[in-house]
Image (cartoon, coloured by chain):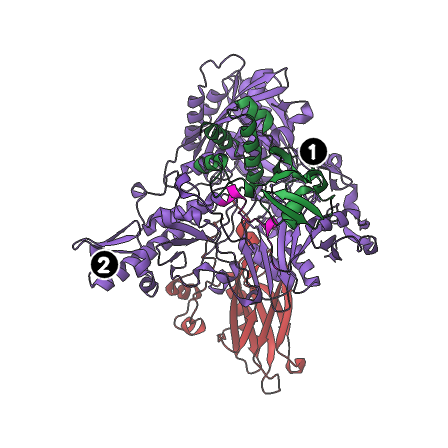
Chain colours: A green, B red, C purple
Amino acid sequence: MARLTINGKSTDLNVDPNTPLLWALREQAGLTGTKYGCGIAQCGACTVHVDGQAVRSCVLPVSGVEGKQVTTIEGLAAGGVLHKVQQAWLEHDVPQCGYCQAGMIMAVAALLRDKPQPTDADIDTTITNICRCGTFQQVREAIHAAARA
Amino acid sequence: MEPCTSDDVVRLNRRAMLQRLGTTGVLVALWPARAWTMSEAVQQAMHQRIGTRTPQPHGMTLRLPPLAETGNSVPLTVAVDSAMTPDDHVLRIHVFVEGNPEPVAATYHLGRRAGKAVISTQMRLARSQTVLALAEMHDGSVRSVTADIVVTLGACVEES
Amino acid sequence: MRTDTPTINRRSFIIGTAAVSGGLALGLRIPLGGEVAHAQDSAPEVTAWVVIRPDDTVVVRIARSEMGQGTLTGLAQMVAEELECDWAKVTTEYPTPGESVKRKRVWGDFSTGGSRGIRTSHDYVRKGGATARTMLIQAAADAWGVPASECKAANSVITHQPSGRTVTYGKVASAAAKLTPPADVVLKDPQDWKLIGKPLKRLDTINKLTGAQVYGADLKLPGMLNATIKDCPVFGGKVKSFETTKVQGMPGVRHVLQVGDSAVAVVADTWWQAKTALDALPVVWDEGPNAMVSSATIAELLQTGLGADQAFVANQNGDVKTAMAGATKQVDAVYAYPFLNHAPMEPMNATARYTAERCEVWTPTQNGEAAFAATMEASGLPADKCEVYKIHIGGGFGRRGAAHDYVTQAVLIAKQIPGTPVKLLWSREEDMTHGRYHPVTQCRLVGAFDASNNLTGLHMRISGQSILSAVRPEALQQGRDPLVFQGLNPSGEFALGYSVPNLLIDHAMRNTHVPPGFWRGVNINQNAIYLECFIDELAHAAGQDALEFRRKLMSKHPKHLAVLNAVAERAGWGTPAPQGVYRGLAQMMSFNSYVAACAEISVIDGNKVKVHRIVGATDPGYAVNPAQIERQIAGSFVYGLSALFMQECTVKDGRIVQENFHTFDSMRIAQMPKVESIIMPSGGFWGGIGEPTICVAAPAVLNAFFNATGRRIRSFPLKHHGIQLV
């Protein structure tokens, strides 16, 4: 049994504590917005926030987040209002297939929390998610737009 | 090659079809509901086997899946409505596959001791097409049936 | 099963109804227990393409598959254009292939590949919209007792012009559905288009931002188990034995199964439990003779084709032998291009439920009918007992179009546990090593010059793998694979853009055991590098500017030339580049579109390449959604440049070596160049968008690299030459 706080709610999950957080979220908690892309923290599709920091959940065991606040893509929009990153993504029509986008959005939301006005260099070093559809041009535009919002 | 469209079965107007076969009127009875271009290869192969007899579309069924992924091995069943008695039996069943390099896929010799006028087999169907089966009856009459199959991998292949 | 959408505060932004209702959320049916959760049950189908609800929502049926390329929105635009409906009320639905077959393929071709989705369906989907509009108008006119000719439709409202009476589509849809469709409809002239050609926002975005979008990997059905699989690591090998007892007691494990003759799967309560157990399962493989194959043996095989006597010819004119013999100068080069994996972000998956009475599959697929055919074949059940539900795709790129191995596997697993739905999701490692690979080839090019530096002859000999030989041998033309020559043909959708007095382009077929498939662009990726880099080599040997050299060969190819000129002009070719910036050009025609690129790069320390900007141009005849086209151009450059710099699938002991993104990398945002798109539709034909531009970024960058460093690279990826993309 593991007690996690996910998107502001305390939840008991019947899960082996060695299970990666990614799979506990997707399977035991039923939150499938966080995606499996590689399982070895290379692609970023599994990015969630742990105490506000962007973390790749595919290599983080559940035991590592007990007592911490976990935020997933499902919890990003607060009270039915889209987060400004989601809003910018919508205005700039960013996603193509969309599979990598939850992780991308979570990584960007964390960046903007740390650096509300990121430079292109900040974006380059912090956002390392893989996107096979290649939405990067729109991602960059939308990050700057969200920063201005 | 032509791109894939929903018109996989080519529709030929009746006049052109009649001209092709050099007959008039007969074909109207043959293929009442369907306009289907029978390729020349299939026509020739058909006439080689049944001579000048005209097949009537009744009394037999052809089961084929409507879609096949690659066409490499497609299950096909032909069944003729016949008691297979001395007075009513099927001599031969022919299957014609126009899209294959050889238009005649198979001929099955039955005869009255066969017991059932059903043949089941796996066939290689090179592309989307119409398959034709004929049954030669003991009294010299010939029956026919057709079925269409779409080979979906064909639809995926871009061809210049 | 997630069908809800999150509540959205409308004050935050303005979006259309279509987005709120989830765009593509519809069409997912979960008919377990017989009930069908189908939103359109009560709404009338005016034509097979158009359903209209009483509240005026328009549901457009889409037969092709959306995989990020924007085809869903583009097709809906075309139907809506002719339908004259309110775009803000448009949503979409995927009819199932089983329904289509029952209705004699009323929705036509489901296949989405070859950049065909819009260009091979535009006329009949537009007719579907026009037919529906005509019937709606007629229904309104009948209700008013007036001639239809006095009525006009716009924005989902029909107006009787003389009297000013109006009625909305939703109110007359039921009556319209009962009318006989007109035999013929006239489509709008392109200059009257109001929706087609506009950069409209996609219909399927909102759920992708909130985690609500369900992908195949996310599907949840009542009573569902999870499975993962290992197929023999050597293609063509088989399972010899496996020790179920070693893992059957592990948490959550329900079944350990052989699947076909070459794979083993574990079925468990959760995917993580299945994967953990499968990783621990001892399996002995009968690897077969292909275990001796390696990249080195494959390269040796390809080399034998470079000078072979026997080859299939695609394009020839004049007499290349004589031209070579009489040449004042010759340029001779050998290039090589590797196997590549598609590596979509979502690994292969399919969910299946089998009973003797019914087999249903839920899967991301680029071809619903092919998935349906695979379901019938694997289950052994007839069409009326099978169904496939298309799920939103997390990246296709060609992997999910032709091969449906994951569907076959899911059905074969489900058959062993009848009645229980099972979701089969491949690990990334399985996906990397069991792909359908971009074919491997080498190419020898020889160019001949006369004394005045005119190009008098060109021989391009491709040696290597044929996709059709493996995937559709019956499409070979007396043994020749026509797809090998994409971009190099004398005419057609993949026509060469150069005239050379003595030309020979031929192919020595050398196949391998590595299964080939259609990787985005298919064969234009290597053909564009081979041709466009070599043309630069020729220009250099002749002491001529790369653009001028090309122009001299293109007077008979005006559309190829137009896109090339467009990128050259925009990039400032011929004017001095900023300090340290070098330019390179490339052009090719494929999938009926003409495209070109000019890349601007800098090279640091001789081996770190910064691509500053790529100007890309496309002439696709008509441009349905320019915003989507821009995204496809830029996105295709990411796919193509990732391959150029970082990607290769090598073979050792018959197996693919690269198992994950750490050895098969992909571009990150830091490396992304600025992409400027020139969309220049010249009208009169329909060309594709998803693929054509992918092939020109790599040769443009390579040509710029030569201009920067004097180094001509002829084998890929560049990381093998110590060259990095920064």
Quadrant assignment, res C47: bottom left
Depth check: give the residue in front, C558 or C137: C137
Is residue C79 depicted above or below C561 in this figure? Answer: below
Q: Which residue is mark 2?
A: C148
Between C123 and C266, the residue placed more toward the observer is: C266
Q: Are marks 2 and 1 in contact (CB under 8 Å)?
A: no
Quadrant of the rendering where the C terminus of chain A is positioned: top left
Q: Does residue C230 appear in this view?
A: no
Quick one: C676 or C141, which is closer to the camera? Answer: C141
Please tell me how crowded label 1 is: few (under 14), some (14-19), or many (20+) other residues with Cα within 10 Å: few
| Callout 2 amino acid | Ala
Q: Which residues are magenta?
A: C207-223
Q: Is residue C169 above or below residue B55?
A: above
- The residue that disc 1 covers is C663
Q: Position of residue B1 (x, y in %)?
A: 49, 48
Residue A104: x, y in percent?
Answer: 56, 35
In the image, residue C358 above or below residue C573: below
Outermost residue on the left side: it is C162
Q: Amino acid at mark 1?
A: Thr
The residue lying furthest to the bottom in this view is B87
- For the residue pair C372 and A4, the one nearer the viewer reads as A4
Q: In the rendering, at what x and y percent does residue C11 appear?
A: 39, 41
Q: Secondary structure at mark 2?
A: helix
Question: How many numbered callouts?
Answer: 2
Where is residue C560 drawn, in percent x and y?
A: 44, 31
Q: Chain of mark 1?
A: C
Callout 2: chain: C
Which residue occupies 68% across, 45% down? Answer: A3
